[in-house]
Amino acid sequence: MRITGGRYVGRTIICPPGVIRPAMDRMRESLFALLGNISGKSFLDLFSGSGLIALEAASRGASKVEAVEKDRGKRSIILKNFEIADERIDLHLIPVERYLMRAKPEWDFVFLDPPFAYRYKQQLLMWIANRGLLGNSGLLLMHHPAPEQLPDNVVPESDRVDSARTLVRVDRRTYGGSAVDFYRPSADE
């Protein structure tokens, strides 16, 4: 697998052992083209796998990049991959669900790439909405099987949290058998 753009374009990364489904080159190129200039922005890569998406963000100038992966067996390979980057990429080896319970707002970009069989994708969206993890102009990207339908709006369950905000789907792109849904915080809040 190779980095598709930015300062580290063409650099090869290692695929760790275990279950992994790396994002296709074409999809990564397309997504980052849609995101535009991410220089100086924060980027959170959830279900990181090999760390490839985090590296793509760092390659394109994101200033704060974090990756979350629960499989501790992937640690050494992910850290080896992160050596490509001149800047620091933080790796959290915990389940994404636990990370989201303590994550600090406000991220410019949040990329979620859970296993396709993962049944709690809508719950992940709800946790992010409840915690207000996206900044006012933040963007969440959820990679999932194309036939799977995610909600158009994710309304927080509780108004007790000042930072809670509704997420609104603003775009959907299909790449072969997979899709990426794009969510932004509602402008009405």
Image (spheres, helix red, strand yellow):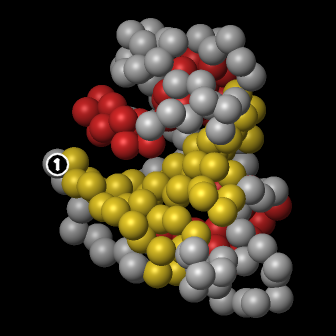
Q: Quadrant of the C terminus?
A: bottom right
* Residue at x-position 74% and y-position 56%: 106
Q: Is residue 118 visible?
A: no
Query: Where residue 15 sits: x, y (%)?
Result: 45, 24
* Residue at x-position 72% and y-position 49%: 94
Foreground of the two, 114 or 149: 149
Q: Quadrant of the N terminus?
A: top left
Say which residue label 1 marks.
176
Q: Name the residue at the left extreme.
A: 176
- Mark 1: which amino acid? Gly
25 lies left or right of 44: left
44 lies left or right of 112: right
11 lies left or right of 98: left
Query: Where residue 161 sits: x, y (%)?
Result: 82, 81
Query: Where residue 87 sits: x, y (%)?
Result: 71, 18
* Residue at x-position 44% and y-position 42%: 35
Query: Where residue 96 sits: x, y (%)?
Result: 65, 56
Check disc 1 and report its element: helix, strand or loop: loop
* Residue at x-position 59% and y-position 25%: 61
Q: Is residue 104 above or below residue 63?
A: below
Residue 163 position by quadrant: bottom right
Foreground of the two, 14 or 39: 39
10 Å crowding of disc 1: few (<14), some (14-19), many (20+): few
